[in-house]
Amino acid sequence: MKESEILTESSGYKQELKRNLKLFSSFAVAFSFISITTGIFTNYQFLLTTAGPAGIWSWIITAVGQILVGLIFAELSGVIPISGYSYQWIKRLSTPMMGWITGWGCFCLLVLLVPTVDWGLAPIIASLVGIIGSPTQISVIVIVTLIIQATLNIVGVKLATLINNAAVFTESVGILVLTVVLIVVAFKNGNNPTILFTTGNTGHGISYVQPFIMSLLLGAFTLVGFETSANLSEETVNAEKTVPKAVISSITISGIFGMLFLIAVTFAISDLAKTTASGNPIPYILQSNLGPVVGKIFLIIVSISIFACSTVIMTSGARLIYAMSRDNVFFASKVFCKVSAKTASPYCATILILVLGIVATLFSNSLTTLVGVTSVLPGTIYLTTIVCYGLARKNVEIKKGCFNLDKAAKPVFILATIWLVFELCVLTIPKDFHTTTLLTVALIFVGFALYFMFFRKSALAEVDKYIEGDSNVEEIL
């Protein structure tokens, strides 16, 4: 039996998922979940109307803050390399209740993210095939996309991974080429670089601080999901060493590539008013600068990246449901913990993500609301995880050769906590975000109610299952 399989079974679980993912595939999973093209294409319109082109510089602040969070998650993913990431970590580091509530938050996030990302993809597909993109047409495109993604995941993670690896290569090369091309074209057209610092029609009569702070939503929505590699730990070769590398590299590279692309696409704006009014600024910028043919080629590349992003999110969501179900702390656990003997895929969990994604598509008429909720939830999950791990870390044994923050741990934890508190304030206090804040709080309260009504006994009983033999965290418990 391989060391990774021994580690899984020592934690109280049978090794059911196939270990096919190596370093690049593990990195690709996290990189695709982050998907800078998805986040930027979905939220660039919001950035222009909220803070103007100068709002792109808020990306740097978010990237640095998220890299600090990523460093902590990288260390933790090496300590407890089990599918279910924050749910598994917190139930060991804190209490079963906190673990379940965090798992519930992760579940809500992933269920909402899948249709949210596909909703961002749908208008691009509509543009490529030459249809108007009415609300009904967009909903149909989203639902068809969800069905295709679910099919790929049910066939097995190996096929989904191959497609994802190709998409990562396409996105990386495409975004770098597009960045260079847009900058060259912008200089050739005589564009004024001062547009990078233009506030547009925002901030007049008030301080620009508030619009700029609100523009953090772009980075807050985009630079999340780097921990997805950890959720697929039981499908990763040498997970305790591979996953931390994937986490750190994915968030760092995404931060750098994203900033370069934002500079290029903003510099390429020739008419700010028309671009903002276009309704879908980046396709407008691409086609007005590169022509319809070249513009469409890049839009196809972007579409592939966004499709891969949502596919990976569905993969991650299914693994979380599977992880909670095998602990008997999820609805119909006996159904959703099933794994296909042929493909080693948690197919029932995938079908649930599909059904809930379709429901969210049919009953939500506001992409902005979905984006807002899926921005607040990650920050809440990250902060909860970091606080729980920070309080317990002194009792955790980090194996030799695994990623270790060592003496840098204290300042990294302090700075990451300050950043997350600030980010959550930004995403909840402004009046524009009150609706999403209330929805997020409501989801959390529902989680507490469900825990005490249905899952408390099962969660407490589960403690005895993993406390014995989990050498990394047994002292804490």
Image (cartoon, rainbow, N blue to C red):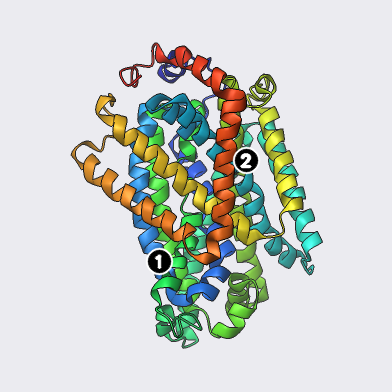
Label 2 residue SS: helix
- Residue at left 50%, top 62%? 175
On the image, the x and y values in percent for residue 21 come to 50, 32
- Residue at left 56%, top 69%? 46
The label number, if any, that marks residue 314 in the structure image:
2
On the image, the x and y values in percent for residue 407 come to 18, 39
Q: Is residue 236 left or right of residue 108?
A: left
Work out whether residue 246 or residue 135 is closer to the camera in this orientation and state it: 135
Alpha-carbon neighbours of circle 1 within 10 Å: few (<14), some, or many (≥20)? many
Alpha-carbon neighbours of circle 2 within 10 Å: few (<14), some, or many (≥20)? many
The quarter of the rendered structure image containing the C terminus is top left
Q: Is residue 425 left or right of residue 431?
A: left
Nearer the viewer's eye, disc 2 or disc 1?
1
Work out whether residue 15 or residue 462 is closer to the camera in this orientation and state it: 462
- Inspect this view and state whether residue 312 appears: no
On the image, the x and y values in percent for residue 230 come to 46, 34
- Residue at left 60%, top 73%? 281
Work out whether residue 211 or residue 71 is closer to the camera in this orientation and state it: 211
The label number, if any, that marks residue 58 in the structure image:
1
The label number, if any, that marks residue 374 in the structure image:
none
Tell me how far mark 2 sits from mark 1, CA to CA.
29 Å
Q: Looking at numbered disc 1 in the image, what kind of residue is underneath it?
A: Ser
- Residue at left 35%, top 50%? 67
On the image, the x and y values in percent for residue 26 come to 47, 38
Q: Earlier in the sequence, mark 2 or mark 1?
A: 1
Question: Looking at the image, is 47 positioned above or below residue 203?
Answer: above
